[in-house]
Image: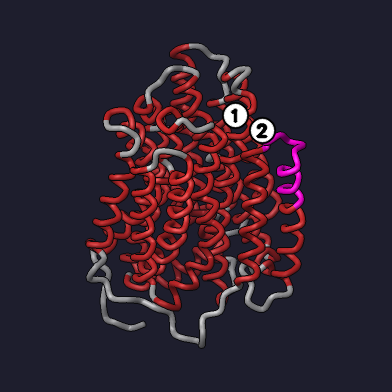
């Protein structure tokens, strides 16, 4: 859609604010589990459901929201996402129990599904060349760095102002984002007939993933052999098989499984899912240091400062390594460093200051590894997708991020919650071991599927174009 408009600093600032609202309600929540639980008087299991629902609903609807943005307008869907963010955050500000908390988290998940693909589409539409690379870097820093900023800020806000103020700030950032992108022209893809969406596939996916999420998060409370839990497990297993069968035979598919025939793309997407699942570490580590070691939410947030600095610094470093060595080496080393960092946080047998130091180093390594991994993985997924399926490939890759985060948090928190009544130390170690396993599986998927030359040809092509 040609408008002659060129992206401005005001526009990219508004987009970054929009992306940060996602992290304020997604990431900050993992820092304040004890405070929310104490204030609302709800069970840890219920709270864990609420935490994972945002990523779950974001993952389920992000592909559809991206397609809708192309059709009806990327600015319009960004605005809808920011309005949903305000509504979801407002529900969390006024909630007095589990009901509004869960509804608010679902609305926030739908908000994220709208904001993430539509803002990156606006960046691609209105910036070119070096300006686009700079804008995408700011978007990535808002996205990856936002997790660290909001983890730290959330802890400080909860300690000194109360946890509800996190979501008041989220509303303020959303309003500022709307104000700053107000003058941006609307952007749509060229019309190719009526917008078609795989409603049947989405319905099957939603039912399947909700059943699986309930099985993981409610198994302890309802009883692992109770009828509701066994029904959830059966629905999840049957749903997975039905979804794959339906999608493979569907002309308008929610997930194009043919994309996974490309090994580099498959390796990048699988490892992206698994490394986002490692986010479960944040819930377990932050909850344990507060409940088991007596830290305040602010002190807990301070422990993740190394993560924040490392991930911000290393995103650009990962980009440079990609250009010189291809994608496989930084993806492997990023995953190894992340997994080692996670393992450090599981050393709960250490006492006093020694454990505090080890957790700080663990968070720093976590951020260091993810920063190295991020750009090479994203580049591998996009550069290995067919030219006519880049949008679909990027949507599935982003869906893997959100769903990985949702199930990583759900599984880790369920393991921690099941063992915590007996021993908080063993519970924390066990929950973190789950995330070490996710890291090892991510490493295996990269080694097995991503060729050594991945990324090099794409970079050489870009260099020739620039030259």
Residue 123 is one of the magenta-drawn residues:
no
Q: What percent of the width, then of the height, locates residue 26?
A: 43, 45
Local crowd size for mark 2, using a 10 Å CA cut-off: few (<14), some (14–19), many (≥20): some
The answer to whether residue 222 is magenta is: yes
Q: Is residue 31 above or below residue 20?
A: above
Q: Can residue 298 be seen in this view?
A: yes
- Which residue does the numbered mark 2 point to in the structure image? 220
Spatial CA distance of label 2 from label 1 is 8 Å
| Image-based side of 132 in relation to 395, left or right | left
Along the line of sight, the residue nearer the viewer: 382 or 467: 382
Q: Where is residue 380 in the image (x, y as percent from the top left)?
A: 56, 59
Residue displayed at 66% across by 63% down: 204
Mark 1: which secondary structure? Answer: helix
Q: Where is residue 382 in the image (x, y as percent from the top left)?
A: 54, 64
Residue at the extreme top of the image, as rendered: 351
Total marks shown come to: 2
Classify mark 2: helix, strand or loop. helix
At 51% across and 57% down in the image, what residue appears? 378
Any part of residue 134 in sight? no
Q: Is residue 240 left or right of residue 7?
A: right
Residue at 49% across, 36% down: 366
Q: Name the residue under label 1.
A: 417
Task: Work out whether residue 218 or residue 356 is closer to the camera in this orientation and state it.
Answer: 218
């Amino acid at each position: 859609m040609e408008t002659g408009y060129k992206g401005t600093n005001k526009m990219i600032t508004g987009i970054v604010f929009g992306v940060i609202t996602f992290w304020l309600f997604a990431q900050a929540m993992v820092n304040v589990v004890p405070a929310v639980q104490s204030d609302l008087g709800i069970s840890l299991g219920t709270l864990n459901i609420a935490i994972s629902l945002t990523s779950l609903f974001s993952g389920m609807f992000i592909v559809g929201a991206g397609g809708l943005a192309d059709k009806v307008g990327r600015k319009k869907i960004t605005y809808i996402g920011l309005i949903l963010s305000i509504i979801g955050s407002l529900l969390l500000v006024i909630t007095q129990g589990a009901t509004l908390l869960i509804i608010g988290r679902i609305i926030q998940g739908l908000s994220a599904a709208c904001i993430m693909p539509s803002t990156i589409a606006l960046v691609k539409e209105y910036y070119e060349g070096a300006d686009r690379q700079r804008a995408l870097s700011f978007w990535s820093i808002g996205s990856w760095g936002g997790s660290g900023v909001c983890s730290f800020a959330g802890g400080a806000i909860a300690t000194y102002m109360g946890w509800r103020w996190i979501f008041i700030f989220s509303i303020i950032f959303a309003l500022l984002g709307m104000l700053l992108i107000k003058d941006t022209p609307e952007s749509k893809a060229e019309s190719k007939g009526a917008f078609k969406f795989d409603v049947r596939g989405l319905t099957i996916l939603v039912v399947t993933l909700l059943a699986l999420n309930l099985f993981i998060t409610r198994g302890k409370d309802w009883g692992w052999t109770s009828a509701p839990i066994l029904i959830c497990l059966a629905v999840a297993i049957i749903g997975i098989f039905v979804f794959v069968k339906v999608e493979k035979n569907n002309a308008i598919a929610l997930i194009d499984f043919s994309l996974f025939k490309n090994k580099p793309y498959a390796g990048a997407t699988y490892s992206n899912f698994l490394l986002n699942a490692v986010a479960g570490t944040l819930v377990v580590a932050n909850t344990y240091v507060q409940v088991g070691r007596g830290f305040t939410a602010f002190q807990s947030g301070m422990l993740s400062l190394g993560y924040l600095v490392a991930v911000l610094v290393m995103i650009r470093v990962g980009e440079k390594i990609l250009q010189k060595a291809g994608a496989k080496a930084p993806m492997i080393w990023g995953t190894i460093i992340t997994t080692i960092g996670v393992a450090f946080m599981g050393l709960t047998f250490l006492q006093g200051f020694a454990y505090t130091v080890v957790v700080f180093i663990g968070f720093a390594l976590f951020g260091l590894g993810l920063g190295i991994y991020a750009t090479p993985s994203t580049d591998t997924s996009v550069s290995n997708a067919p030219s006519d399926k880049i949008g679909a490939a990027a949507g599935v890759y982003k869906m893997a991020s959100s769903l990985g985060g949702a199930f990583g948090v759900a599984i880790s928190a369920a393991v921690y919650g099941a063992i915590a009544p007996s021993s908080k130390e063993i519970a924390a170690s066990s929950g973190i071991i789950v995330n070490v396993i996710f890291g090892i599986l991510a490493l295996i998927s990269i080694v097995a599927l991503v060729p050594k030359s991945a990324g090099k040809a794409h970079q050489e092509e870009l260099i020739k174009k620039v030259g």
